[in-house]
Image: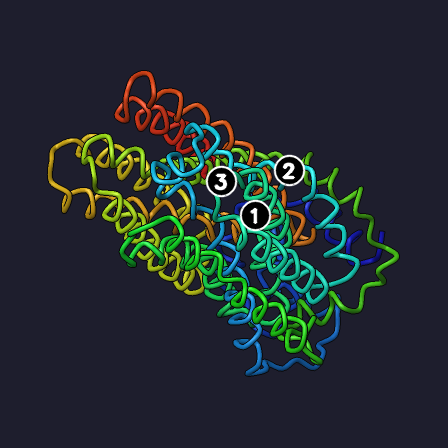
Amino acid sequence: MGDKEEFVQSWVESHSDCCLDEERSRKESSSFFGENNHQLPLGEGSVSLESEDQLLPLMETKLYKRRWLMLIIFSLYSMSNAFMWLQYSIISNIFMHFYSIDSLAIDWLSMIYFLTYIPFILPVTWMLDKRGLRDIVVVGAAFNCIGAWIKTGTADPQMFPMTFFGQFVCSVATVFLLGIPSRLASIWFGQQEVSTACSIGVLGNEVLIHIFIICKVESVLHVMSILNNALISTLNFYVCFLVFQDQPKLPPSQAQAQARSIDPDEYSYKASILRLLKNKPFMLLVVSYGLNVGCFYSISTLLNRMIIEYYPGEEVNAGRIGLTIVIAGMVGSLICGIWLDKTKTYKQTSLAVYIFTLIGMLVFAFTLNIGHLWVVFVTGGVLGFFMTGYLPLGFEFAVELTFPESEGTSSGLLNCSAQIFGIIFTISQGKIIDKWGTFAGNMFLAVFLLIGTAMTGRHLY
């Protein structure tokens, strides 16, 4: 363990968390712990600026304009991958008829994304630490491109196995992107914009999920020709390969400057994982984050079935409601990111958003069957605003709780939890809908959101 880590460890053991909020509000861009990914764990204390300045000298830093280009490139890659995720389940009844399969088979075209993530996330986060951002982004874009080309040729009733295989290849690409936003934001962006950058990176994965629904669905072949546009994924791969950079020449903050000075041989990935698993506040967040995002995954996968039950023949409007949820979520993500950059109130904001997510879920469940689609648009938008807005909050809160561990590792564990709960909730809610109806399925999710709210509230005490 280096001198810095020994100092931090000894200091943490001798101080309480009473001065955390006060010290966090005094952070300056020149301080060592100014970057979000290099702060002490919430609830475990913080180092004063005087101690930081004595501990490590100031180094040259610079904010490059190209940081926004890196974020845009990643967001486009993320969008193209999300484009593939729900293209079948959002109009599940059409594809069930086209491929002559049941609803569970269609649901697995979405859930394969969750299942693939679980065994691959630890190797990928290890690669992220060893190889850097560029290699991970390029490899992920390559998988996304290959999967898109595979699915382009599956517009045939006998080609469902190949469709599933193409979806699996695209799901591998997801493993390479979900942990990137917080890492990219920390490496390229300054202290006062890192949460906003993380939010933009996260919402990139959501923005194109339902865009195709604005097109009129006239045939499966027409829909698939829109969704499986492999040329877009190919172009995206080439842009990532030719333009995307691993990190700026000069770091954006003192935190990143000092992080670069640490000898990589001193870092143990296995030891980092063990430390995270022993971090009780972080593990509490892992479960609560998984419950929230798992509910979002389930709703996104089963939304078409929910709408069609009460509004038969409204497949296009079901997709538009999904689009409303995503757009509202984009706004929520941006607002939450900007708010965090301004206030640094991670605990309070996370709890508030979680509470409103629970309320939004209850309102959505109780109003879905009243017979007015415009009400569903409104309630779905409110639910999406808070539920999707929680995604970047979870990433940034995790970084706060897990200093000085890698952002990619903490984000990876959060997403792993989300994938596990996504599978459980999607299968369970689907079975409940089949047997007892949509209202019972939505109340099933509301119960777990209530549990997640209670767990999030514990971070305040």
Q: Residue at x 49, y 62 (%)?
A: 229
Q: CA distance from mark 3 to mark 1?
A: 26 Å
Q: Secondary structure at mark 2?
A: helix
In what element is the residue under mark 1? helix
Q: Quadrant of residue 233?
A: bottom right
Check residue 398 in the rendering and tell me which mark sits there, or answer none.
Answer: 1
Residue 242 picture quarter: bottom right
The mark lying in front, picked from 3 and 1, is: 3
Location of residue 222 with respect to 254 vertically, above or below: above
Residue type beneath disc 2:
Ile
Question: Which residue is the site of mark 3?
Answer: 110
> Compared with residue 354, is residue 267 higher up or lower down, i.e. above or below?
below
Location of residue 370 in the rendering, given as x and y in whole percent from the top left corner? 12, 33
Q: Which residue is mark 2?
A: 118
Q: Are the residues flagged by discs 3 and 2 in contact, CB closer than 8 Å?
A: no
Q: Amino acid at mark 3?
A: Ser
Q: Residue furthest right?
A: 265
Residue farthest toward the top in the current orientation of the protein: 435
Say how the picture is coloured.
Answer: rainbow
Task: Say what amino acid the circle numbered 1 marks.
Answer: Ala
What residue is at 42 percent from the left and 46 percent from the top?
350
Decide which of 444, 196 is in the foreground and name it: 444
Question: Considering depth in this image, is 262 or 235 the residue closer to the camera?
Answer: 235
Name which residue lies at 43% across and 53% down. Answer: 224
How packed is label 1: few (under 14 Cα within 10 Å), some, or many (20 or more)?
many
Depth check: give the residue in front, 459 or 283. 283
